[in-house]
Image (tube, rainbow, N blue to C red):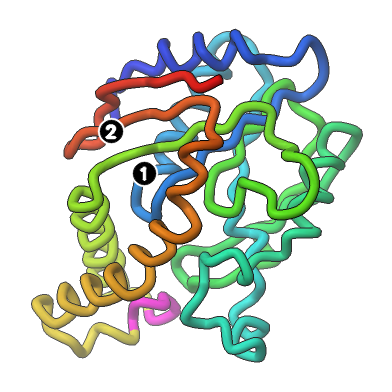
Amino acid sequence: MAGMDLSQVAERLAARRPASGTYVVGVTGAVAAGKSVFAQSLAEHLAADGERVELVCTDGFLLPNARLAELELTNQKGFPPSYDHAALRAALEGVRQGPTIFPGYSHVTYDVDPALARTLDPPDVLVIEGLNLVPTHGPSLIDTLVYLDAEEAHLEAWYVDRFLGLWEAAEHDPASFYARFRGMSRPEVEGLARMVWQKVNLKNLRDHIAPARAQADLVVRKGPDHAIVAVEARG
């Protein structure tokens, strides 16, 4: 996403900013939509204007893998029941008032990692990216919600590429979640990634993630190379 022009997005965000207090911007969209890279680029863009910006992820609010196994939710990781909704709401409320702990998540071990937790003072802007940003109970604690939109075929291709990249990186990292797949051939791993996409991530997208598009304040449309092709304001 290097060289991506975020000025139009930043302008739309500025127009929706509250008069005072921490401005909470949510970035959501499908698995593999590029939320992390987009949110990082957005945070850097806003910080370049002198804002004190913090970036966090909802992955830290997933239930630990052991707890998901106890609840028989391992195959629904990323679905709404797999999150600690109360903890996420408490953190978003707390960070507007004082130092607040945001838990961390490792995409290498594929689990919540206490060592990655961070304590944040109230920033000028908090960018939070990930799933589970549309509340099921109570009012939203997000001031502006950005939805990253892309064709399902592009999303699947991005997911498979990411899966293969993590599988390749696991060759020299036995602690990686993806190390368990190192005994498989590349075509077998690609087939596994496509199966996971079709049976898990696509279902989550259609049933739980895509509905957030209608509730988003901004919809950022991405092309096959992740470049922004359109920005649509809602409401």
The residue wearing badge 2 is 222
Name which residue lies at 63% across and 14% down. 16
Residue pictured at 80% horizontal, 59% vertical:
86
Q: For residue 201, what is the image quadrant?
A: bottom left
Left or right placement of residue 36 versus residue 88 in this view: left
Residue 149 on image: x %, y %: 35, 38
Left or right of 39, for residue 153: left
**Circle 2 residues within 10 Å: few <14, some 14–19, many ≥20:** some
The spot of residue 157 in percent (x, y) is 19, 55
The amino acid at mark 2 is Lys
Q: From what the image shows, is residue 38 above or below residue 187? A: above
Image position, residue 145 (x, y; %): 57, 32
Q: Residue 34 bears which disc, if any?
A: 1
Residue at x-position 28% and y-position 84%: 181
Inspect the magenta stretch and tell me whether residue 223 lies in it.
no
Q: Is residue 177 magenta?
A: yes
Mark 2 / mark 1, whichever is N-terminal: 1
Q: Which mark is residue 183?
A: none
Query: Label 1: few (<14), some or many (≥20) within 10 Å?
Result: many
Q: Which residues are magenta?
A: 174-179
Residues at marks 2 and 1 touching, judged by CB atoms closer than 8 Å:
yes
The part of the image, by quadrant, that contains residue 231 is top left
Looking at numbered disc 1 in the image, what kind of residue is underneath it?
Gly
- Residue at image point 30% right, 66% down: 166
